[in-house]
Amino acid sequence: MPLKRFSIRVKLTIGALLPLFVAIMICSLAGIYTINSSVVRQAQEKVRTDLNSAREIYLSEVAHIRDVVSLTANAPFTATVFANGRHARLSSLLSPLRSSERLDMLTAVSSDGRVLFRARNPEVFGDSRAGDRLVSRALRGEAVAGTAIFSPEDLLMEGPDLARQATIEILETPRARPSNKQVGRSGMLLVSSAPVRDEAGRIVGALYGGVLLNGNNNLVDKIKTIVYEGVQFQGEDAGTATMFLDDLRINTNVQTKGGGRAIGTRLSEEVYNHVIVNQKKWIDPAFVVKDWYFSAYEPILDLDGKVVGSLYVGMLGKPYTAIKQKVTLIFCGVLLLGSLVGLAVSGFIGSRLSRPIRELQNLVKRFSAGEKDVQIAVTTSDEIGDLAGEFNIMTGKLNQREAEIRELNSELERKVSERTAELEEKNQLLIKAKEDLVRAEKLAAVGELAAGVAHEINNPMAIIRGNAELLQMAIPAANPCREEADIIAQQVGRVERIVASLLQFARRERRYLEKTNINRLLDEILGQVGHQVPLTGIMVRKEFAPELAQVNGDDGQLRQVFTNLILNAVQAMPDGGTLTVTTEEDIPAEVCVVTVGDTGIGIAPDNLQQIFNPFFTTKATGTGLGLSVSYGIVKDHGGSITVWSEEEKGATFTVSFPLNR
Ligand code: ADP
């Protein structure tokens, strides 16, 4: 499977973002954990101190009852009233006091423990309270104060309304400790007792009083007001306090779902075991009635130091949960924002970093596609900048090398074509030399043969000529045979001319070289040519170079060459035409150039190669030796002879000789 391709920009972005994201994530989790745990710890710590405050308030309430009871018991007239024992006196002492000090009960007992007077329930008296710890300890001279549990019967004696107040219907709540009771009837009271002594210091009785806590929320509301200052969260008290008799909530400001006070609900098994059974403080979150609270419980001991209930304070967990949520939300926001900013920043940096790389890639592509002038603008001073610089150097070197190679190539091509041209020239020269050699060999052979033949023919011809002349002389002019004799003499003359030509061709007479004026020579020839052939209808044009340098040559032989050429030209124009003779100097080549041109019949292409061969002729009476003899003479003079011709348009012969300067 092909690997997925990611651009450098994406990789850089991920590379930068991932650690950032992980770092923010770790910081967030650590932050959330730290803040949450410190919030919980602090909340829990606060509840611990709140419980101390609550205990102080509780104890101050006990102290208040103790003070009321002790001061009254110790007052000098109290013993007198006790000794008197009359209800009216006792009532006038105790009833206003109970009301003013808001005591639920204030009772006087005699020295043997019998009830003398109950300020709350004056009708019931005379019963013995000697077995009660509160009373017995006071009658032994001890002033006591603290918490006490009263049975329903005792409460009934103290006042039927008190017994009713103490009766609490047990409510079922989630997590509450299981119970088979429907109603709680015992009462928990803050009590105090003190002995009453006469002037001699003898104990004449005792006084005890107290406040019933069942259904009495004054104390817990006081705690709430003092400790939590009545702070609320979403309509609920943020701080609460409760007092338990055993596991039963007898007064509280914790609310039920219905909004009432949760009196009658019970402790959870866990808290009960911890606080009531094991007599330890509970400082931890706990589920109370319907919500979680940061809670603190401590046991309440009775006068004998036995655990009879517990005091509770708690702070609603919801505000802290809200803080935790808020903190978590803030951290999530920071994480998100940080990630977004990181994404933007790393994306920006990634794109800035990858831009020169992309540019480099494009330029490399363009360069490999053949573009020459490829240069990267080096903008960064890092490895990419170095790479771009190296790339520029590399392209520069490659371009330079390519230019050198191109130059070498064209130099090579130029040299090759030069050499080829030289070779071609040499080849042409070789072909020409070969042709010349063949021609020379041929001419030599022909010349040798011709010389032999001419030599052999000369003697018989002399005899024939002599006899023919004798015949001409012997035969009178009027004789019809005279014409044959004349023809014989005429043809003998022709044969002699041919033989002479042959001998000239074969022998190559010695050359007498001298300075020859070509213009003059041509003038002479043109002046005399009319004697040899009729020039009827022929226009002669002379275009001579005015100051033509002289040529070193044999006057007679050169005359023969030009005569041949001019005669051939005239013969090629039987119907008239223009004969053009030119001379000029070719300064660079240091030659004298003579052309003889006509507007005659021209030379067939097939014949062009043969006209310089001996005995080649197209004329009925031609010998075919004129041009071959001329060719030999020109060559002997170190010159050259060439021909241009087009059929029906004429021919031009060009002869050049080295100039004699
Ligand atoms: P001849 O004149 O006796 O034929 P040459 O050697 O002088 O011998 O000439 C050879 C042949 O070259 C001629 O027969 C003719 O065919 C051809 N020739 C030479 N000069 C000319 C010219 N000016 N125009 C046409 N043909 C020419």
Image: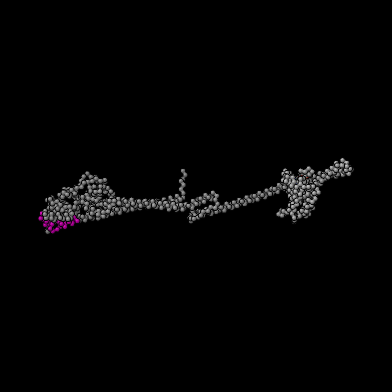
- Residue drawn at (15%, 52%), measured in percent from left and top? 120
Residue 606 x %, y %? 72, 43
**Residue segment shown in magenta:** 64-86
> Looking at the rendering, in which quadrant would you find the C terminus?
bottom right
Residue 338 x %, y %? 39, 52
Q: Extreme top residue here?
A: 480
- Residue drawn at (46%, 47%), measured in percent from left and top? 5
Q: Main secondary structure of the magenta part?
A: helix
Indicate the quadrant where residue 72 lies. Answer: bottom left
Q: Is residue 577 left or right of residue 72?
A: right
Q: Is residue 215 magenta?
A: no
Count of numbered marks? 0
- Residue drawn at (21%, 45%), measured in percent from left and top? 182
Residue 202 x %, y %? 12, 57
Residue 455 x %, y %? 82, 45
Q: Is residue 474 left or right of residue 71?
A: right
Q: Is residue 638 visible?
A: no
Q: Is residue 236 left or right of residue 154?
A: right
**Picture quadrant of ligand 1:** top right
Closer-to-camera residue (93/231):
231
Q: Is residue 84 magenta?
A: yes
Q: Extreme front residue here?
A: 537
Q: Is residue 418 visible?
A: yes
Indicate the quadrant where residue 229 lies. Answer: bottom left
Q: How is the image coloured?
A: one colour
Closer-to-camera residue (577/609):
577
